[in-house]
Image (cartoon, rainbow, N blue to C red):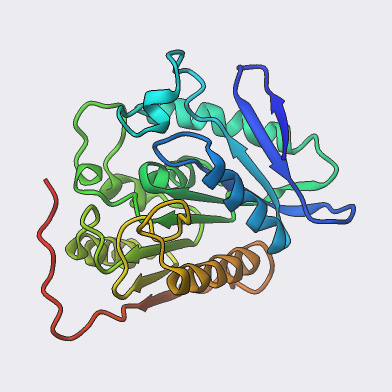
Amino acid sequence: MKEETLASGMRVWSASPDGAGPFPSAIIFHERRGPVAHTFRMAERMTQEGFAAFVPDFFHRYTEPRGPVEAAEIRVEMPDEDTLTDYDELVEYIDTLSFADADRVVAAGFCQTGRTPLVIASHRSNLSGAIVFHGGIYPRDFDAIGRGEEAVTGLVTRVTCPVLGAFGELDELVPLPNVWAFRDMLEKNRKSFQIRLFPGTPHSWMDVSNDRYREEAAAQAWQLLGEFSRAVTSDAWNRDQLIFRFESGVKADQTFLPAAS
């Protein structure tokens, strides 16, 4: 992947399919470990779906050694104001590139950055699709507690594009009642969405570098991600029609995990 450093000091890595483009753009937000090998693999995989892919370092304001961050020993907070500033700079950069289309952009967040596409979609109108993977609706995301992050209940009311949500049935960090609440909020606020709950699947099931990886579920998730991204960056998703899609797959005798504290 090609690395560039923008005026703010934010590093951005990019990759694109073969050919001249311009291709629709996919922003892949890193998880709590920051930009690591798994993040770059995700971006490179998006090029196979026909997208110019970008990985921004949204931790660029953090100046301490990255080792403890990459080891998930500490958490770097991401205030919404910084998120929006960085997103605007990133889109301006994409707009200068001949191989990428800055008017057709999907943003995908994972784990800690699951809520990031919702933040952007609630404050900006230039996002084609907001993609949330196993994050965004942690218990902490439902309450504004002074971290400079708005509660997800407020974000959803202003979302300006279709939302894709993908969650694991056995995710101990995103309890099932939170998934139901997210679906209900989107419906109540008349926001188009597609949500899939993967049965028997724990948190972070798409990360091949850890023991939570689930090959079959990951393959299905990639198909879902690619199809949604292509649809919302083309005429395949009718913006004049509300679309509610929810697929559960939860076993009938499932004992719901309690809400995480």
Which quadrant is home to the C terminus?
top left
**For residue 101, above or below residue 85:** below
Q: Tell me: 193 left or right of 20.
A: left
In the displayed structure image, the side of residue 224 where residue 80 appears, left or right: left
Whether 213 is drawn above or below 119: the answer is: below
Q: Position of residue 143 (x, y in %)?
A: 19, 41
User: Looking at the figure, which quarter contains the N terminus?
Assistant: top right
* Residue at (34% x, 63% y) in the render: 167
Residue 135 higher or lower than 89, as above or below: below
Spot occupied by residue 48 in the image (x, y as percentages of width and height): 71, 62
| Residue at image coords 40%, 64% | 166
Residue closest to the far right? 20
Q: Residue at x 36, y 79 (%)?
A: 247
Direction from residue 143 to residue 79 in the image, left or right: right
Across the whole image, how many numbered discs are drawn on residues? 0
Q: Which one is nearer the viewer's eye here, 181 or 77?
A: 77
Query: Residue 80, image x and y in percent?
Result: 40, 31
Q: Quadrant of residue 77?
A: top left
Residue farthest top in this picture = 63
Residue 81's spot in the image, x, y percent?
A: 43, 26
Q: Nearer the viewer, residue 61 or 63?
A: 63
* Residue 20 appears in the figure: yes
Residue 126 appears in the picture as rendered: no
